[in-house]
Every structure is written in structure tokens, then in C-alpha cells.
Image: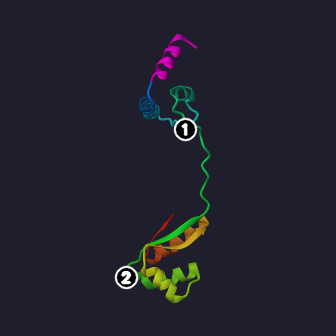
């Protein structure tokens, strides 16, 4: 290593944890990089603030939550809720009237998005979590 690099490394060794955290943030903002990415890893590792990159597991199941149903759209939304859940009229009506309410849990993403689209077209407000 060059004398300049040695000097920087020695300076980094003296930083407190808070200072190292601030340094990482400043480097991220200045150079448009992430401390979790291997780019610039030598500087980040020297600062003692680089966390190993963890694999982020992609979510495969989603919950469909009915957030709100306008009074004039309840019947249309009720029909779709019955279709999605297979519930009887009374149970589906109770679900629609007690928003926010989880309609269905652990749905594949495509099914959740399709159901969300149907409910929104009928006038309801829905979210996928």
C-alpha cells in the first residue's frame, strides 16, 4: 500500500462507531453507492462498518386486505369477496362491513394482484401485504 492509503487506514482505525457510521453515510451519498454492496468494499471494511451482503428472500405469498368500501359499492365488492373467499353471504357481508379486514392470506402474487384489480374496479380500496 502507498503511504497515503496507510495514512487513511490508520485514521479510520481511530474512528468511533458513530463516526464510522457517519463516514459510511457520507460515502454512500457522495459516491452513490451502498455499504451493503461490494463496490468500495475496501474503504467500508476498513471503516469497520460494512455489513456482509445478505440474500433477501423474495416474498412469495401475500395477504389481501380490504381497506375501505364506499356504501354505494358494497354489493359489487361483496360479490367479489364471496367469489375470492368462497364464503357465504352473511360471512362475506360481515367481512365487507368490518374494514379494514384481511380477505385472504398467503396468496400467490399474481392471484393477489388480480383480486385487487377486481375489487378496485368494483369501487373498493384494497392493499396487498
Q: Which mark is residue 71?
A: 2
Q: Which residues are magenta?
A: 1-14
Residue 51 relative to residue 66: left or right: right
Q: Position of residue 12 (x, y in %)?
A: 48, 22
The prevailing secondary structure element of the residues shown in magenta is helix
Between disc 1 and disc 2, the foreground one is 1
Image quarter of residue 115: bottom right
Q: Position of residue 71 (x, y in %)?
A: 37, 82
Q: Position of residue 46 (x, y in %)?
A: 54, 25
Q: Position of residue 113 (x, y in %)?
A: 55, 67
Classed neighbour count for the residue bearing mark 2: other residues with Cα under 10 Å, few (<14), some (14–19), many (≥20): few
Furthest residue toward left = 71
Q: Is residue 107 magenta?
A: no
Q: Residue at x 57, y 65 (%)?
A: 62
How is colour applied across the structure in the image?
rainbow
- Helix or strand or loop: what does disc 2 sit on? helix
Furthest residue toward top = 3
Question: Nearer the N terminus, badge 1 or badge 2?
Answer: 1
Q: Is residue 9 magenta?
A: yes
Image quarter of residue 21: top left
Q: Identify residue for label 1.
A: 36
Amino acid at each position: 500500500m502507498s503511504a497515503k492509503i496507510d495514512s487513511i487506514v490508520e485514521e479510520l482505525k481511530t474512528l468511533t462507531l458513530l463516526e464510522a457510521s457517519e463516514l459510511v453515510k457520507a460515502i454512500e451519498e457522495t459516491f452513490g453507492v451502498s455499504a451493503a454492496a461490494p463496490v468500495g468494499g475496501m474503504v467500508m471494511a476498513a471503516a469497520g462498518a460494512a455489513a456482509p451482503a445478505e440474500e433477501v428472500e423474495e416474498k412469495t405469498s401475500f395477504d389481501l386486505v380490504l381497506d375501505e368500501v364506499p356504501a354505494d359499492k358494497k354489493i359489487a365488492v361483496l360479490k367479489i369477496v364471496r367469489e375470492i373467499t368462497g364464503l357465504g353471504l352473511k360471512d362475506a357481508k360481515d367481512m365487507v362491513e368490518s374494514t379494514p379486514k384481511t380477505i385472504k392470506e398467503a396468496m400467490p402474487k399474481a392471484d393477489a394482484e388480480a383480486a385487487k384489480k377486481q375489487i378496485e374496479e368494483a369501487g373498493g380500496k384494497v392493499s396487498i401485504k
